[in-house]
Amino acid sequence: MRRLWLVRHGPTGARVLCGWSDLPADLSDAAALNRLALALPAAPVVSSDLRRARATADALAEDRPRLPPEPGLREMHFGAWEMRTHAECEREDPALARALWETPGTPAPPGGESWDALSARVHATFDRLLAARAGDLIAVCHFGPILACLQRARRVDARTVMAQRIEPLSLSVLRIEEGGWTEEAAGLRL
């Protein structure tokens, strides 16, 4: 038995759909970072290749081994809706905007990625990372990839898992066993 420790990157301050856009994280809350670092095991740290996740992982790594950044752990790609507000997207295409959040699965923003595509990418990346090493793994990534992992552990549909709050610098923990993934904690703020 081992654990996958999922940390959402530090806050960006953006109030827009920020998927593959490479915004920095605000890592000024040293106390929160310290509490989080103390809660994490002595395990390798991986992150998405976006700088908000990389910088957060670097701040938490301390003496832990740092694995190369993984593009497969990026946030959902919002395509033409990148860096736009929910309201702007709803005005442009109300039906698609509703479908993206209310019936996630195959709907995708124009030129972007569907929930199913995000989930497949994230699961393939974690399956590869976990197969390559024994023991626990710490992953600093994004809202969407963390939800995809929780969906897998809970064995629920995407709409159900979308109700879970995953705040910046929160911790979710999954137990990984031969029989599957099990949630131990989700969205903890330390």
Image (cartoon, rainbow, N blue to C red):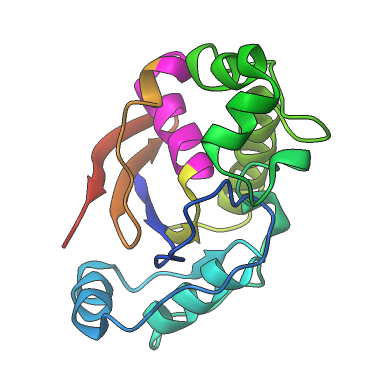
Residue 176: quarter of image: top left
Q: Position of residue 127 (x, y in %)?
A: 61, 41
Position of residue 38 in the picture relative to residue 171 (left or right): left
On screen, 170 above or below 46?
above
The residue nearer to you, when weighing 69 against 104, is 104
Asked if the magenta segment contains residue 158, the reply would be yes
Say which quarter of the image contains residue 146. top left
The residue sitting at 25% across, 85% down in the picture is 30
Q: Nearer the viewer, residue 121 or 53?
A: 53
Indicate whether 91 appears above or below 123.
above
Give the residues in magenta. Answer: 144-159
**Residue 168 at x, y percent in the picture:** 35, 58
Q: Nearer the viewer, residue 54 or 5?
A: 54
184 left or right, relative to 27: left
Prevailing secondary structure of the magenta residues? helix
Give coordinates of residue 162: x percent, y percent. Answer: 40, 26
Left or right of 106 in this view: 160 = left
Quarter location, residue 35: bottom left
Q: Is residue 136 visible?
A: no
Residue displayed at 68% across by 59% down: 21
Tell me the quadrant of the picture where the N terminus can be found. Answer: top left
Residue 151 drawn above or below residue 39: above
Does 1 lie within the magenta span? no
Q: Residue at x 53, y 33 (%)?
A: 87
The answer to whether residue 181 is above or below residue 67 is above
Which residue occupies 39% across, 88% down? 63
- Residue extending farthest to the front is 91
Is any part of residue 33 visible from this angle? yes
